[in-house]
Structures are given as C-alpha cells and as structure tokens.
Image (cartoon, rainbow, N blue to C red):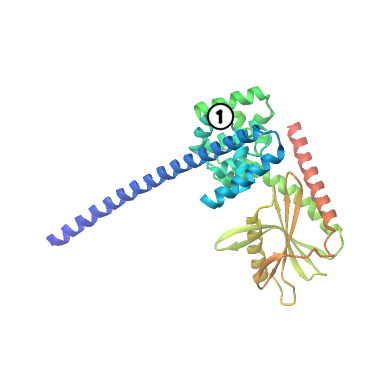
Amino acid sequence: MGMSKASAAVNDLSAGLLKDIRALIKEARQQTAAAVNVGLTLLYWRMGQRIHAEMLGNERATYGEQIVATLSRQLVAEYGRSFGVKNLRHMMRFADVYPEEKIVYALSRQLSWTHFRSLLYLDKPLQRDFYAEMCRIEGWSTRTLRERIDSMLYERTALSKKPDELIEQELATLRTTGDLSLPFVLKDPYVLDFLGLQDRYLEKDLEDAILRELETFILELGTGFSFIARQKRIQLDNDDFYIDLLFYNRKLKRLVAIDLKLGDFKAEYKGQMELYLRWLDRHEREADEQTPLGIILCTGKKQEQIELLELDKTGIHVAEYLTVLPPREEFEQRLHLAITQSRARFENREGEA
C-alpha cells in the first residue's frame, strides 16, 4: 500500500512537472518565433531601403532592372529562393511605403512579412495604416486580413468618410491606447456587434444581391438551364458548406455549381470547388449524367474573373469553355453589371438611412 501511495504521488508530481515544462517550452518557442519574425521583417525593410537608394543614385531605368536581376541571381545562389526578383521588388516597395524603421519595428512585433505584403499595394496610406492597426489590435491572421481587404472593410467604416486629418488623429489614438473608437466599428449605416457578425451579414447581403442578378441572367438564356438551389447545403466531414448557386443543364446533362467570391481569384478556391464537385458527383449525379461542372466567379477590383472547372477521374482541371454557356465576354459583362448595380443599391440604401 505504501508503495502504491508513493507511486501515485510520483505520478501526480510528474504530471505537474510535465505540464510546467511544456508551458516553458511553448513560451520559449513563441518568443523565439517572434524574435525571428522581427529580425526577418527588419532585414527585408533594410534590404529594400538599400536597393532603393542604389537605384536612386542612377537615373537610368535599365540600370535598375539590371541591378535587381543581378543581385537576385547572386542572393538566390547563396541564400535560396526567398531572394528572387519578385521578393526583392516587394522589399523595395516595403521601404518606400513605410519610410520609418521605428514604425516597421513596432508593427513587426505583431505582423508577419506576409501581413506586410498584403498591405504594400493598397492605394491609400491611411487605408494601409487602418488595416495594419486592426491586425495589431485584433490579432488577425494573414487570411483574415486578405478577406477584410477583399470585402472592402475600410471603405465601409464611418472612419473612411472622415477628412484625412481626423482619420490620422483616430489612428494615432488607436496606436496609443489600443481602444477602438466608434468610427472604427460603426458601419455606414450598420453597427458591428460585439461578435463581428454584422460585418459578415452586410457582405452576405451584397453576395446575395449579385447572385440574384446572375440567377436571373442564366435562366433568361433559355439554353437548358434549370434552377435547383441557392445556398445548397452539403456536409463534408461533419462540417457544413454552401454552394452559392446550383443548376442543371439539359443539353450538357450535368449539374452546374456556381461559387461567387468577393475579391481576386485565389488558388484555394479551386480546391474548395473540387470538394463541392466530388460531393455532387457522389451524392447528386444520376447514372446517365455527366460529371458536374464548376464555375467560380471572382469580383476582383482590377477585373471580374471567371474560372470554369471540370471533374474527371484524375481530379479537377480547367475545362474548355462550352458553347451552351453564355459567351465568356457576355458573362463577364453581366457579372460586372450585377456587381455595379448591387453595390449602387447598397450605397443608396446607406445614404437614405
């Protein structure tokens, strides 16, 4: 009995000791990762500044192109692909849009290099500052940051409607206190609730309005399309997913799934569509039907983009554009029109509120 009690005491002590040691290791790893991130970010900023200074010293444009290409080849050979031409240009842009090292240092304690890369090509300095501060305060991942930019969060805040001087004051207050003032959370005219749900509702309202326009357009074509569902619910590994629009086409003898994305096309959208098509192929396709077809519509800021994807035995691939579908140019024009009309309605509704 004595041995049993001693063994239990040792086990309890070991469990507590193990828990403490794990916590120490975790904390040390986090501190190391944070230090590495700060060091790497500052390195990229300093490299961008040095390259930029070198190019400013010579007015010939061709010199700049040559120096970046030559430098990249040498660095890649010595240190790896992180120093390719494209990344060197990102570093130069980094030093250009963030001219003060102390600001870069402060932000790099919470933001990674991939965060900064998402911010570098935003048009307005105050827009960049807004997203950077929101990342710092809210702890956004890179993916969340990109989603917020794609959904035009800044443009939809009351803050963005203020004069530049007042925006700068609000951002300065946020840096100092860390508190989000009303203009940061007040939508025009929506208020973001404590869980952040209202922001998503506004984005979904816009998506739904665009989808309704596209649904009408497709059904008006008279080329064999039949409407099946909007927001078709499917289950994958106990998680719920929703296909924005689902049609059946008699001429193609196949299901056609349409997914709308606010923002530019990302590679992950293709993988998501493949999951949808595999599910439809397994659970919805009849024996005499062809494999399902997927269409991804992206409402990028530069231009609207349409990706047509098809499933076969080897997986998903880019499909040939089919004649039974609306001509690609017409489809792109109608997508652009649907976006323009839907956004205009929202702006009018906000103006009247």
Task: Write the residue at 58% across / 38% down.
Answer: 48
Above or below, 350 relative to 176: below
Q: In the drawing, does residue 281 fall left or right of residue 195?
A: right
Badge 1 element: loop
Identify the image quadrant of residue 310: bottom right
Task: Write the residue at 82% across / 46% down.
Answer: 337
Image quadrant holding the N terminus, namely: bottom left
Residue 179 seen in the current view = no
Q: In the drawing, does residue 169 fall left or right of residue 123?
A: left
Q: Position of residue 174 (x, y in %)?
A: 54, 28
User: Residue extending furthest left?
Assistant: 2
Q: In the drawing, does residue 327 fall left or right of residue 243?
A: right
Identify the image quadrant of residue 341: top right
Q: Nearer the viewer, residue 52 or 110?
A: 52
Image quadrant holding the C terminus, namely: top right
Label 1 crowd bin: few (<14), some (14–19), many (20+), radius 10 Å: few
Q: In the drawing, does residue 34 fall left or right of residue 216?
A: left
Q: Nearer the viewer, residue 212 or 175?
A: 175
Above or below, 193 relative to 100: below
Above or below, 22 relative to 7: above
Q: Position of residue 164 (x, y in %)?
A: 67, 25
Identify the image quadrant of residue 325: bottom right
Q: Position of residue 311 (x, y in %)?
A: 69, 68
Task: Write the residue at 65% across / 32% down.
Answer: 56
Q: Nearer the viewer, residue 45 or 77?
A: 77
Residue denoted by label 1: 100
Q: Nearer the viewer, residue 77 or 303?
A: 77
